[in-house]
Image (cartoon, rainbow, N blue to C red):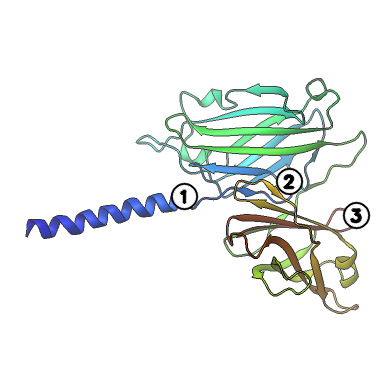
Amino acid sequence: MKVINVVPNTIVLFMLIFLCVNQQSSAQNSIAPFTGIKYFQEGVTIKGIEVKLNAMMLLHNRVPLNKEIEIYVQQPKGFTTDAKKVVFAAAEVSIVSAKGEVLFTTPNAFSAKATTGFIPKDFITPVIKCALTTQLIKANTTATIKIRLYDLKGKNQLRVEFPVNITRPGEALLLSKIAKSVKAPTNITALINDIIVAGVKATVDTAVTKNPKMAYLALDIQKIDGSSFVGILEGKEEFWVYDKNLNAIKPADMLLKEVKGTMEGSTVNSFVKIPYRLKTAAANGYVVRYRWHSNDLLQVIDVVVML
């Protein structure tokens, strides 16, 4: 009887270990809408990441000099905690030029909390601040802000890479107080600004005859309101494809697009098909980002899909 009791307990323990390992390994690297920030979840996982200037959300990756940039990390998990659930986290911040030269680095932007740590309510959305100064950037027109958010009591970490373009003197900043998320399945993150979208769905289409060798990501952007049939057609759009390590992939084909609605109506649906892999390639392990914006740059639809 003792042997019979031991075996089920062992099986249960094994199942729990397997579920924990499987859950941890399921966390994927991803891209943040609006800014194109890359984040690598290496034990530390997050819900998302946003950037703000002057308490407003940044809608692009163009940033000014001599302004404080605030990077909001949403709901980080994976840190070792003590009996009071205190988190001991550090944030290494570096600014790197396009040539790979380290222009600035600080080992821990959270150094004031290194000893006391963060109580749970202060670590729901930690903020990492930095500024690109004229003296620091000099003649560079681009740079990458690199962050390593890591556990002081363990080995887990989150790496962030934020590629930025420096704005020109007098250039208007693309900032907003009204940007919000869109209802979508768990593998989709969609943000919008100054426009209404009821929902976003994504499927894989392997039946496109334009290029029978390619698999396409079919995006159904539903019930767009606040623009028009012509406005959606005339807006500008881009897309990016990445592998599981967030290395850029450049498909040879252009995206396909169909807008359904009436010339007089205010609500339209947009159907977009993005070529992202050969049919013979692995089916999973991709990140696809699609961005549409109006000609005045104020209305934005930015969608990231994990495949």
Callout 3 secondary element: loop
Which image quarter: residue 104? Answer: top right
Confirm whether residue 22 shows in the render. yes
Q: Earlier in the sequence, mark 3 or mark 2?
A: 2
- The picture places residue 20, in percent across and down from the top left corner, at 38, 51
Of badges 2 and 1, nearer the viewer stands 1
| Looking at the image, residue 239 lies above or below residue 115 | below
Task: Identify which amino acid the numbered label 1 is placed on.
Answer: Ser
Of the image marks 1 and 3, the number of the one nearer the N terminus: 1
Q: What's under tag 3, amino acid-wise?
A: Asp
Image location of residue 186, percent across then percent down: 57, 61
The crowding category of the residue bearing disc 3, from other C-alpha atoms within 10 Å (few below 14, some 14 to 19, many at least 20), is: few
Which one is in front, 113 or 277? 277
Q: Quadrant of residue 143?
A: top right
Residue 35 marker: 2
Q: Name the one closer to the observer, 111 or 209.
A: 209
Q: Quick check: 187 left or right of 236?
A: left
Q: Which quadrant of the figure contains the C terminus? A: bottom right
Question: Badge 3 is on which residue?
Answer: 296
Q: Which residue shows up at 70% across the image and 42% down it?
A: 51
